[in-house]
């Protein structure tokens, strides 16, 4: 983590950062740091500072357990969600939880605090040296539980059923990425010994970044916006546990910094918490996910700034940017701000100022030090990308949405490199100080060595952003199991109620009457799809091994004989899987429906507009 105080001596900083980059200068990075210092002197008061403080022994483990959705292990309450979560963990994930819980309990016993549960009571282990049954390493279906006897089906490389995440200057041999098996379970001992090295040198040559191919299984791919908020909350729990297990498998400590959050301002648009900004914006534009002022700045730069040489690198006038900032604070919500007066370089300066003045940064600062350490110790890009992928899954919705908007813009800047002279590495060096400089008051020389590492992290974010917004399918599989376990627990609780048992007995008898059973039976592999916005409201569809989600959408559109004016509306609609062992899931058009049906036979199927 970088801080303003740590950047007092640019010449010294350049010299100590030089060794971490392969034959390159970090001049752009330090020039940006100088620009930040000049533009922010005496502007921020104490309420906008965010500090890193040492944590008490055991405090970090308690915080980790709470953030992982396992507060029940601390409180002792038998919460259904906590028990359901524990029941879905892989071998390495369970070991990671056990390790943190052991540290927490040992600390609490030393402090003579309230009694704590023994880890053996939680995992059902009889001896003092817990062991776990290995989880089978065969691929798990993308969006469901393991099906016995079913083999995963992949499309060949010459089909369209894969995503190619590379650039023309990347190595010609593409590496395959799979989301079917837990990242931590995929690490083998040989890889661990071979990959763990000290003093890694970061190569600035963008062509050194590999191409990755993400294969689509028969369940397709799932983006972060395709799942319900409730299921995404569970994804965050599982991602933290998986990230910790991933670090453990590589023999690296996942240190968590204790952050004192900044209070921020309550009015204006700069130095205001994201949640406050979005509350204000949603009063003007319902459903807004990215702050309106941020959208306007991006739009301004995309319309007129992408071809400007040195955009992002060449600063605008410091006094003019400061004046525009004050004017935006006062006039933005009154719709009286004149955007015509904003020059391209001024817009870039305002954009960077907005980013660095957020009270809480885009990315989880608590784990930034640990991730920088990971980048410095692990040279393999694939492993770096997997760790970064899990960090993205940890982000709150508001942070992830604004980060996605920023990275999409930065990708456009790089795409226009011939005109704006901004390469991927240049853009990364300019943006890194704005994203990762902490507004605290403590720093040390070791943090200064992280300059090249933070630029490399931004480079990975820009280059592989499409991969990072895809929810790993093994996490979705665990969410399904978690939902099923919670449902089973709820049913067991209900059975303790005598009146409920009597009611269920009567309902069961009615269900088993021959005349009722014949009416309720539905042929195997037949689903009823509902489309509230279509003239033909519902349709029963017989599935076969080749039926895809896009085939069902096309059939509805054909049956309703929609004209050309409705074609655009059709493109924004999706087939949703709702209920059963998932909250809500917008299916990939290439999803094979029979496979999803087998995984979640109790779901409802609805065609409706996709979430924007």
Image (cartoon, grey):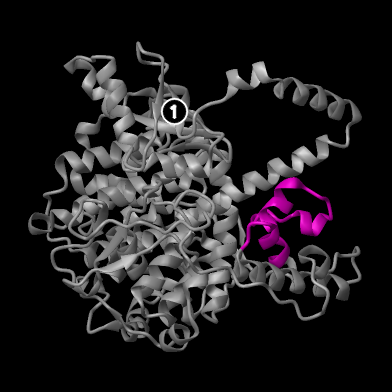
Please name the residue that numbered disc 1 is placed on: 287
Disc 1 is placed on an element classified as loop
Residue 469 position within the rendered picture, expressed as x and y whole percent measured from the top left: 39, 51
- Look at the image and say whether residue 219 sits in the magenta stretch: no
Residue at screen point 29% across, 46% down: 321
The quadrant where residue 11 appears? bottom left
Q: Is residue 13 visible?
A: yes
Residue 58 position within the rendered picture, expressed as x and y whole percent measured from the top left: 75, 70
Question: In this image, 305 relative to 513: left or right?
Answer: left
Residue at screen point 36% across, 48% down: 220
Instruction: Classify 351 as above or below 539.
Output: below
- Report crowding for label 1: few under 14, some 14 to 19, many 20 or more residues within 10 A (C-alpha): few
Name of the residue lying farthest toward the front: 514
Question: In this image, 439 relative to 112: left or right?
Answer: left
Residue 117 position within the rendered picture, expressed as x and y whole percent measured from the top left: 85, 64
Question: In this image, 253 relative to 110: left or right?
Answer: left
Region in magenta: 60-89
């Amino acid at each position: 983590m970088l801080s303003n105080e740590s950047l007092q001596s640019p010449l010294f900083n350049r010299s100590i950062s030089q060794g971490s980059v392969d034959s390159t200068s970090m001049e752009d990075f330090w020039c940006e740091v100088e620009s930040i210092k000049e533009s922010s002197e005496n502007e921020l008061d104490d309420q906008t500072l965010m500090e890193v403080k040492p944590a008490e022994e055991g405090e970090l483990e308690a915080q980790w357990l709470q953030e992982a959705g396992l507060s029940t292990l601390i409180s002792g309450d038998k919460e259904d969600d906590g028990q359901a979560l524990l029941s879905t963990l892989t071998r390495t994930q369970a070991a990671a939880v056990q390790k943190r819980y052991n540290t927490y309990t040992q600390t609490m016993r030393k402090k003579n605090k309230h009694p704590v549960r023994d880890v053996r009571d939680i995992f059902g282990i009889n001896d003092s040296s817990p062991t776990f049954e290995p989880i089978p390493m065969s691929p798990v279906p993308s969006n469901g539980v393991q099906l016995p006897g079913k083999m995963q089906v992949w499309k060949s490389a010459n089909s369209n059923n894969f995503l190619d995440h590379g650039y023309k200057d990347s190595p010609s041999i593409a590496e395959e990425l799979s989301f079917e098996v837990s990242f931590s379970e995929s690490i083998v001992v040989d890889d661990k010994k071979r990959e763990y090295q000290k003093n890694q040198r970061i190569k600035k040559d963008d062509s050194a970044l590999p191409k990755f191919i993400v294969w689509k299984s028969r369940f397709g791919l799932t983006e972060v916006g395709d799942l319900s908020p409730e299921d995404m909350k569970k994804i965050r729990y599982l991602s933290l546990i998986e990230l910790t297990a991933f670090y453990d498998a590589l023999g690296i400590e996942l240190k968590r910094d204790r952050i004192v959050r900044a209070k921020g301002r309550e009015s204006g648009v700069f130095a205001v918490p994201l949640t406050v900004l979005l509350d204000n914006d949603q009063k003007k534009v319902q459903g807004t996910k990215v702050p309106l002022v941020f959208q306007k700045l991006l739009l301004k730069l995309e319309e007129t700034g992408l071809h400007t040489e040195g955009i992002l690198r060449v600063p605008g006038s410091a006094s003019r940017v400061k004046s525009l900032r004050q004017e935006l604070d006062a006039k933005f919500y009154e719709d009286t701000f004149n955007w015509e007066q904003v020059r391209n370089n001024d817009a870039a300066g305002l954009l960077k100022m907005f980013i660095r003045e957020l009270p809480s940064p885009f990315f989880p600062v608590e784990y930034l030090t640990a991730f920088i350490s990971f980048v410095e110790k692990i040279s393999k890009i694939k492993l770096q990308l997997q760790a970064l992928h899990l960090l993205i899954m940890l982000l709150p919705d508001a942070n992830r949405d604004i980060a996605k908007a920023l990275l999409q813009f930065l990708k456009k800047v790089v795409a226009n490199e011939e005109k704006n002279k901004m390469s991927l590495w240049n853009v990364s060096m300019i943006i890194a100080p704005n994203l990762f400089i902490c507004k605290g008051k403590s720093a040390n020389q070791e943090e200064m060595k992280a300059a090249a590492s933070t630029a490399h992290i931004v480079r990975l974010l820009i280059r592989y952003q499409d991969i990072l917004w895809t929810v790993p399918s093994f996490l979705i599989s665990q969410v399904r199991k978690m939902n099923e376990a919670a449902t089973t627990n709820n049913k067991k609780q209900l059975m303790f109620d005598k009146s409920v048992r009597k009611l269920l007995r009567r309902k069961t008898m009615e269900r088993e009457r021959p005349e009722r059973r014949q009416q309720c039976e539905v042929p195997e592999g037949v689903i009823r799809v509902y489309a509230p916005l279509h003239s033909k409201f519902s349709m029963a569809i017989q599935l076969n091994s080749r039926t895809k989600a896009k085939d069902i959408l096309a059939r509805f559109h054909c049956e309703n004989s929609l004209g050309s004016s409705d074609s655009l509306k059709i493109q924004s609609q999706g087939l949703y899987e709702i209920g059963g062992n998932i909250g809500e899931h917008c299916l990939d058009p290439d999803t094979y429906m029979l496979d999803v049906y087998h995984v979640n036979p109790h779901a409802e199927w609805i065609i409706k507009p996709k979430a924007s």
